[in-house]
Image (spheres, helix red, strand yellow):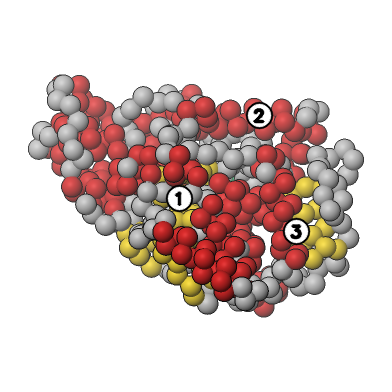
Amino acid sequence: MSAIRLYDTMRRAKVDFEPADPKRVTMYVCGPTVYGRAHIGNARPAVVFDVLQRLLRHTYGAESVVYARNITDIDDKIMAAAVAEGVDPKVITGRYEAHYLADMGALGVQPPNIAPHATDHIPQMIAMIGGLIDRGAAYAAEEHVLFDVAAPGDYGRLSRRPLDEMIAGARVEIAPYKRNPADFVLWKPSTDDQPGWESPWGRGRPGWHIECSAMIAAHLGHTIDIHGGGLDLIFPHHENELAQSSCAHDGAPLARVWMHNGFLSMGDTKMSKSLGNVVTVDALLEQGWSGEVLRLALLSAHYRQPLAWTEDLLTQSKATLDRWQGFLRRSDVAASEVPERVIAALADDLNTPAVVAAIARLSRLDDVGGMRAAMALMGLIEPITGRVDELAPATPEATAATNIDDLVAARTAARARKDFAESDRIRDDLVEQGIILEDSAGGTTWRRA
Ligand code: AMP
Ligand code: ZN
């Protein structure tokens, strides 16, 4: 079995991937804010991390991976879209979530195990914000709650931005109630006609970053194996998630490996709704490009490299796929084991261009069984569905294991109040379950023996 190596944004290096618990590999990818159709740039992380979850399931067992991708269904852009149409925000989010799942399904993206919605986790967010205030890492001011970026001591670690630079670069007018210009919003007030929830700080709604921190803790635990998203999420979104989560969890790091895909561009600039240079997935499908062609085009470049979206790329991807499918049609040889060369390429930081070359080589060798296996692992041949009620399976053991984090937190709390009898008892308990604790200056992490 090839050891998986992944590029970790935190360490700026390719590292050996070692999950805390090989029976419960946890991955969280920041999902869409649902207020419009997804463009093909938005599809890049969905497809890239879909290939990664397939590789993880192939390596650790299909039921040993817990993959969560959230739906952000409370946001100012959603509210603006609802006002523009004169409908309830739920009409907007329901419609565009359904479109998103259908579009990603057409690209062969399997539904994650868990698709948490922000609006279903408001109590968890309020609890986490309360905990941050108790720990002195957040403060309430003028109906807002703000995170104090001085609290973690190493804010800016992930994006490697010095704090003074972030303060100098803090955008637009700085709200007068901020202690530090880089402090960011955890909770903000809602007017009567805006969606809102009762909280200790008045009726309001959460900021974007706290959503992911609360949903990760609720479903996956304090330290997850892989956290992913596009390059633009490193700062501020992931930097802020990291700061909040580790302050809320006694310094436990949020993720063992941070992964970020590069940008897809069209006409020399990043494809982006605000720039207007977008082509949506459904428009491409309507033009007659198949989901498999779009997927192959997305995977033809390494995920960390920029990808220029051109007609030429689509034409070439279609020609390649037509050729491969021609081979498969001429023979009814069933899929074999996935060839080692293919696994090795994927295990090398998801080197999909090398897999494409390997499949071409298999076709030259007339190895139809190997081609079928490799194309299935890449998600290029299989029944295509995109229904959220078909969430991938995970063992009960895998989904229940969050309580280990609770025990670790209880032990940290016992140590803080110098109740060593209790902290030793919890540690012994965990050892009996095969859990090894690792204490460091940054906090405590655990792994299975
Ligand atoms: P958004 O709905 O804008 O938050 O984006 C959803 C995901 O798509 C995030 O992980 C973004 O980083 C990613 N993304 C947005 N635009 C691009 C692009 N042009 N190329 C690659 N990824 C993108
Ligand atoms: Zn997020």
Seen at 61% across and 69% down, the residue is 414
Q: Which mark is residue 130?
A: 3
Q: Which mark is residue 94?
A: 2
Q: Amino acid at mark 1?
A: Thr
Location of the C terminus by quadrant is: bottom left
78 relative to 337 in the view: left or right = right
Q: Tell me, yes or no, if residue 313 can be seen here.
A: no
Q: Earlier in the sequence, mark 3 or mark 1?
A: 1
Q: Amino acid at mark 3?
A: Gly
**Which residue is denoted by mark 1 in the rendering?**
26
Calculate the distance from the C-alpha at mark 1 to the C-alpha at mark 2.
27 Å
Percent coordinates x, y for residue 127 in the rendering: 72, 53
161 relative to 172 in the view: left or right = left
Seen at 53% across and 73% down, the residue is 442
Calculate the distance from the C-alpha at mark 3 to the C-alpha at mark 2.
30 Å
Q: Nearer the viewer, mark 1 or mark 2?
A: 1
